[in-house]
Amino acid sequence: MSWFTNALSSTIGKKVIMSLTGLFLITFLIVHVSGNMLLFKNDGGEAFNLYAEFMTTSPLIKIASYILYSGIILHVIYALILSVKNKQARPIGYKLANPNQNSNWRSRNMGVLGTIVLIFLVIHMRSFWYEMHFGDVPIKTYSGVEVSDLYTVVKAAFGEWWYSLLYVLAMVGLAFHLVHGFWSAFQTLGMSHKKYTPFIKTVALIFAIVVPVLFASMPVYFYIQSL
Ligand code: HEM
């Protein structure tokens, strides 16, 4: 087992954990953005509320949620460990180096972008996740089934211009974090290949634009509706 703990504590081992947790979080984003698209269904929130209820009560999804929370925590912890190690290895920073030669703007700013996404996540979880689990969410009844009316909570939150603006700005940060993160995860896992690299880079770019734009369209849609 010592080879395993040694591998995990090495720099490359830590990078592999960052990549695997990052790819797992990317999968979550696909599921989350797809489910949230139900917000656009013109049914007063029925489909979205039923979906949200299923996501909070299904035992299998509950297990997936705990794996998700662990994934987020591991990703953040290992990002912190790696950046402290990088700083220790290079105490004078990048001042003497040519930044463009070493890495591009995005890769040097992954920590800043990751922090923006993390701050967004804390605000986001407080607004919706906390409300759903511990708040006083109104109840709606569909075909005799009582569910929390999370649709109304989302609609009310995005009716505030500053809250919607915060989401749109955070999605810009998420887009830049994803475009580099997606690609570098594949690179760390050894999947760079002359033939496939351009394809992975294109998929990363499309994903990093489409997913945040879809997320950002939700606050924009509800804010415009509230005017
Ligand atoms: C802008 C559009 C978004 C909307 C309308 C939205 C909506 C929601 C809602 C209503 C919940 C609570 C669901 C529940 O507890 O049952 C939730 C949970 C969550 N959201 Fe979002 N979300 C958005 C964007 C994002 C983004 C961009 C991220 C990540 C960067 C994210 C990460 C999460 C996480 C981690 C949870 C907790 C999931 C769980 O408990 O399993 N969300 N979201």
Image: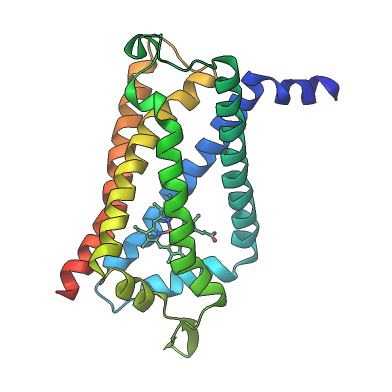
Residue 221 vertical placement versus 132 (above, below): above
Compare residues 219 and 143 and report the one nearer the observer: 219
Q: Looking at the image, which is closer to me, 64 or 90?
A: 90
Q: Is residue 46 visible?
A: no
223 sits left or right of 37 in the view: left
At horizontal 35% and vertical 27% (from top left) the residue drawn is 106
Q: How many marks?
A: 0
Where does residue 75 sit, x and y in percent of width and height? 57, 39
In the image as oriented, which residue stretches furthest toward the bottom? 144
The answer to whether 36 is drawn above or below residue 42 in the figure is above
Quadrant of the picture in which ligand 1 is shown: bottom left
In which quadrant of the rendered image does the C terminus lie? bottom left
At 44% from the left edge and 11% from the top edge, which residue is drawn? 193
For this rendering, which residue is in front, 227 or 90?
90
Quadrant in which residue 37 is drawn:
bottom left
Image quadrant holding the N terminus, namely top right
Residue 59 in picture, x, y percent from top left: 65, 65
Residue shown at 29% from the left, 68% from the top:
158
Left or right: 4 in relation to 225: right
Residue nearer the viewer, 86 or 188: 86
Q: Is residue 208 visible?
A: yes
Report x, y in % for residue 94: 43, 16
Residue that protrudes farthest toward the right in the picture? 1
Colour mapping used in the image: rainbow
Residue placed at 38% from the left, 24% from the top? Answer: 200
Left or right, 49 with respect to 73, comes to: left
3 is higher (above) or lower (below) than 34: above
Please state the horizontal and vertical placement of residue 112, each as a whole percent of the image.
Answer: 42, 36
